[in-house]
Image (cartoon, helix red, strand yellow):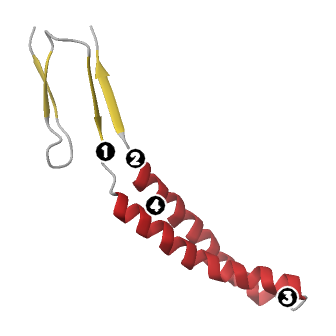
Amino acid sequence: MGTIRINGSGKGMNTNVDTAHLPFEWESSKGSKAAGVFLVIFALFWGGMPTAILVGSIASGKFEPEILFTLIFTVIGIGIFIGGLALFRYKKTGSFSK
């Protein structure tokens, strides 16, 4: 048997696998928890405040069509929130077997 080299994209992500000792499994965490938490909190402010203004204006009966422009901030905030969760939770796994 031989050796297979797994090349990763980050520091310490390169691995040599001895194919004589299979099966082989690995798991790497590529995400940054601090960056993920920051993006989630940022998204709550970015999209949360305009959404609160929009919902408040609808509930109070003072809705004007110009306020719908704030929806773009809500949509972008949802995207940032999902990106933050993905960064916080991302893990890469793999395995080799005979």
Q: Position of residue 79 (x, y in %)?
A: 54, 63
Q: Are marks 4 and 1 in contact (CB under 8 Å)?
A: no
Kind of residue indicated by mark 2: Tyr
Q: Earlier in the sequence, mark 3 or mark 2?
A: 3
Kind of residue indicated by mark 3: Phe
With 1 as the anchor, is 31 left or right in this view?
Answer: right
Residue 63: which numbered mark, if any? 3
- Quadrant in which residue 77 is drawn: bottom right
Q: Earlier in the sequence, mark 1 or mark 2?
A: 1
Q: How far separated are the C-alphas under marks 3 and 4?
A: 31 Å
Q: Name the residue under label 4.
A: 84
Residue located farthest toward the right when viewing the structure as drawn: 61
- Quadrant in which residue 93 is drawn: top left
Q: Where is residue 32 in the image (x, y as percent from the top left)?
A: 33, 57
Q: How far separated are the C-alphas under marks 1 and 3?
A: 46 Å
Q: Which of marks 4 and 1 is nearer the N terminus?
A: 1
Q: Mark 1 points at which residue?
A: 29
Give the vertical position of 14 relative to 68 (above or below): above
Q: Which residue is drawn at 72% across and 85% down?
A: 53
Q: What element carries label 2?
A: loop
Q: Residue at x 56, y 73 (%)?
A: 44
Which-is-in-front pick, marks 3 and 2?
Answer: 2
